[in-house]
Amino acid sequence: MGQESLVDLKDDFLGLSSRWTARSGAPDEYDMEKQYDASTAASSSSMLGQDSLKVVQRPVIVDADEYHMKQLPLSGDMCIFDINLHDGVAARQNVERYYAMCKEKLGLHVTTSCFTTWRKSKKTNGHAKVIPVHPADTEAVRVFFFDDNLEWGGHEESSGICNLRDSSTGEFVNFAEGENGFKRDRAARHTVIYHSDHYRTVLVKANILDAMEDTEYFSSIVERFSSPGEKFLIFMDVNSTIVCNDTIQGKDLGSTLLSTMFEFVNLRPREGFDFVFDDSPSIRIEKPENLKSLVKRITAHSHEAYGSFWTEDRCWQLFAALADRGEVTWSGSEDNFDLDDCQTLFKEYLISLGRAISKDGIAPSWFTVFDKLKGEHSVHLNSFGVDTRKVILATVPDELQALQVTVNYELWDARDVQKFEGQFQN
């Protein structure tokens, strides 16, 4: 076959592709351009030369009508679809459609959840990130949700970030220990897990230190809590789950580790008190709070003071002063956590994390688990923020093949809308 006939053949394929793409119901098997570019281009490029036949990438094709989504009118090549999962009766019906879409789309995709709805509802589970699940006796799909902010009250009105929904009914699924088959377990050093065989569901309160320390962290949890023959639908938070924020902000390893550890150290004061640290203004401490949050309040008067705070001397000094005023524990544990415990853990992590933290702050264990899952299972980054694109770009060769879904975009605050749209203009 000559060069001219090959080019004509490609034009025919692309013409057919464009007609199917224009239809909202065009399924993946009709993405003729993708099929042509993936196979024919590879075999013909040697005859035509590398520059004669350019592979054209197009966004992943989605049947918006089937899933009751609408495409957002944003500029650029990215196709972004919005779905209603919070407003009215239709939202409950859409849970099943959202579940079907997430399950059917293999590879890596993104859901940006509605922070406004969660915040206005006092950050309760029933208005948080929608995680669709299905009764175990209907199909062999195991749902995993990894998030560092999971809380274990488990009720719809409980404080938390997990809006667990039965996709067949749209009803909230109570995931408190003992409800709907949920049992408590642990993994790695500090990770807490609630799992249920009634719903084939595994909820993981992820710990970024565990994720950084062990390259098999996520993979080992998936393997441990799954059964042969199951398909996996994995929802993954980003910040402090697979990405260490402080690394991105330019802190050295010691400072990064101290600030990250202090996020997991909780103070429960015996009574309310006013607290002054060094020359900083006084703050009032009345309720349980993690030490990193307290440092932010102590240094609120100066951005420079916060940045320079994270030294061993200052951190140990603060820890000792606060330990005298209440009970100090590590997140997820009720046992006392004293200064010696903290210093010992710091030294251990300093050694084990020395080679693990990358410049972009993404845990190596994330790349490990995705490499094992891609092509056969579905992975969805689920975040309230605009932190997902960096992970997409670092993980897959073509971000246009990652489906982008927003939840109730019309309810977002103007600031969130501006940040979300801005990330695709760079």
Image (tube, rainbow, N blue to C red):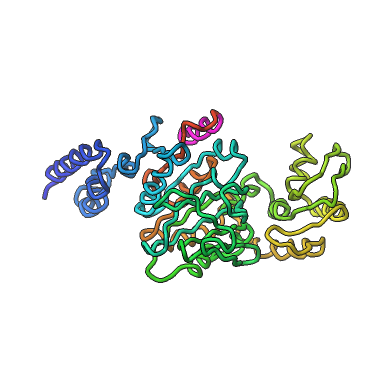
Viewer-proximal residue among 35 and 273: 273
As for residue 151 lying within the magenta part, the answer is no
At 27% from the left and 38% from the top, the residue drawn is 24
Provide the residue span drawn in magenta.
Answer: 415-426
Q: Does residue 360 appear to the left or right of 90 in the view shown? A: right
Residue 111 appears in view: yes
Q: Position of residue 211 (x, y in %)?
A: 59, 60
Q: Residue furthest top?
A: 414
Q: Position of residue 369 (x, y in %)?
A: 48, 61
Viewer-proximal residue among 173 and 405: 173
Q: Does residue 12 appear to the left or right of 276 in the view shown? A: left
Figure check: 90 above or below 151: above
Viewer-proximal residue among 53 and 92: 92
Q: Does residue 303 appear to the left or right of 125 in the view shown? A: right
At 36% from the left and 35% from the top, the residue drawn is 70
Prevailing secondary structure class for the magenta stretch in the rendered image: helix
Q: Quadrant of residue 123?
A: top right
Numbered-mark total: 0
Residue 187 appears in view: no
Q: Position of residue 298 (x, y in %)?
A: 80, 41
At 81% from the left and 44% from the top, the residue drawn is 285
As for residue 421 lying within the magenta part, the answer is yes
